Every structure is written in C-alpha cells, then in structure tokens.
Image (cartoon, rainbow, N blue to C red):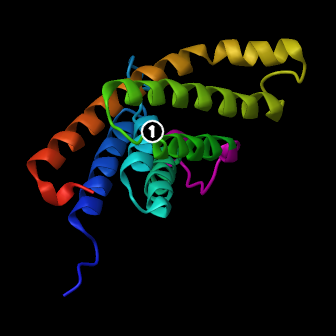
Amino acid sequence: MKTIINSRTSVLVAMILSASAWRLIFATSHTPLHNFTPIGAMALFGGCYFSDKWKAFLVPILTLWLTDLAMNYIYFHQFMWFYDGFLWTYGAFAAMVLVGTFIKKVNIGNVALACISTALLHYIITDLGVWLDGRMYPLNWQGFTACYIAAIPFLERMLAANLMFAGAMFGAFEWAQKKYTVLAA
C-alpha cells in the first residue's frame, strides 16, 4: 500500500505548526516577546527541508495565513481574510522561503547567514509597503527614512527570533534525521 503522507513530511509540517503556536500564544502579550515570532525560521525551515518546492512554499505560507486569521480575530475582534499590506508581508515571506531553498548544507554558518538575510529582506520589503501605503508616513525622503528608522526594533526582534527559532528547528530536525533514518531525505 502506498503511503499518502510520508514520515518526513509529517514531521516537517508538525514542526512548523508547533512553531506557529508560539506566535498565537504571545500575540496579545505586551512583553519583550511581543513580535518575537518564528515566522522567518518557519519560512527558512520549509524552504530548506521540503524536497517538493510547492510544499516548501505552501506549508509555511498557509501556516502564516492561518495564524493571521486567528490574530486578526484576537486583535480586531473580527474575522478578516486579509489585512491591508498583506501582499507585502506574504511577498517577503515567500522571499524568505526562497532563501531557505538555497541552503544546501545545514550548518551554523549557513543558517545564521540565512537568518540575517531573511530578517533584512522582511525589513526592506514590508516597510517599503508601509511607506508606499502613505497613511503613516509621507511619500517623501523624510517619510521614507522615518518609516525605516521606526521599524528598527521590529528588525531586531525578527533577527533575534530567526536565530533562536531556526537554531531550535534546524538543530532538532538535524538531530532527528540522525536518530531516525526514515526522516532523512
């Protein structure tokens, strides 16, 4: 009998879903962990480990969307399919998955470089969207620089979260592949 979903795929999906739970748990907290989420690590992880590239993009992006649905309800007390600026966010997220596809050898250096790259990509893409929206910052050089300066704390949290969650996710899966050969590609 043919296996519909293999063990490796199941574990990868479970790890991404588990990481996304952190995002929901701390969605409304006003602690230093607010906006300290695993989304960048989830994107890198999916991009790196799913051998089918459609899964590499679908699983992390679908997980982001599902947690966004929940967070929109938590924050705004209403159900929203999409929010203003979601295209910029999801475009940045897809770019992060793409970066993950370029990780051919998983080691601390490659994962750390990917974490830094994806934090910067997220910062550049999403904050360009915030600036171009024109509601928070004027569409001039002063507005542009004010937007990016105001976003520096978000960049810092994204980078720290990428490093921590990617370290945990990549490390756990590399260990699991060595212990359980069925998980190896």
Q: Tell me if 167 is positioned left or right of 37 in this view.
A: left
Q: Tell me if 150 is positioned left or right of 179 in this view.
A: right
Crowding at dot 1, Cα within 10 Å, few <14 / some 14-19 / many 20+, comes out as many
Looking at the image, which is closer to me, 11 or 143?
A: 11
User: Is 85 part of what is drawn in magenta?
Assistant: yes
Q: Which residues are magenta?
A: 73-87
User: Is 15 part of what is drawn in magenta?
Assistant: no
Q: Main secondary structure of the magenta part?
A: loop
**Residue shown at 36% from the left, 50% from the top:** 49
**Is there any visible trace of residue 102 in the rendered image?**
yes
**Is there any visible trace of residue 29 in the rendered image?**
no
The image position of residue 67, as x and y in percent, is 45, 49
Residue behind mark 1: 39
Looking at the image, which is closer to me, 148 or 80?
A: 148
**Residue shown at 22% from the left, 41% from the top:** 174
When the figure is inspected, residue 146 is found, relative to residue 10, above or below; the finding is above
Count of labels shown? 1
Q: Residue furthest front?
A: 105
Q: Quadrant of the C terminus?
A: bottom left
**Residue shown at 26% from the left, 32% from the top:** 168
The image position of residue 122, as x and y in percent, is 59, 32
**Residue shown at 77% from the left, 13% from the top:** 145
Q: Quadrant of the rendered structure where residue 42 is? A: top left
The image position of residue 69, as x and y in percent, is 51, 52
**Element at badge 1?**
helix
Q: Residue furthest left?
A: 179
Looking at the image, which is closer to me, 137 or 113?
A: 113
Three-letter code for the amino acid on which mark 1 is drawn: Ile
When the figure is inspected, residue 65 is found, relative to residue 161, above or below; the finding is below
Q: Quadrant of the N terminus?
A: bottom left
When the figure is inspected, residue 161 is found, relative to residue 14, above or below; the finding is above
Q: Quadrant of the rendered structure where residue 20 is? A: top left
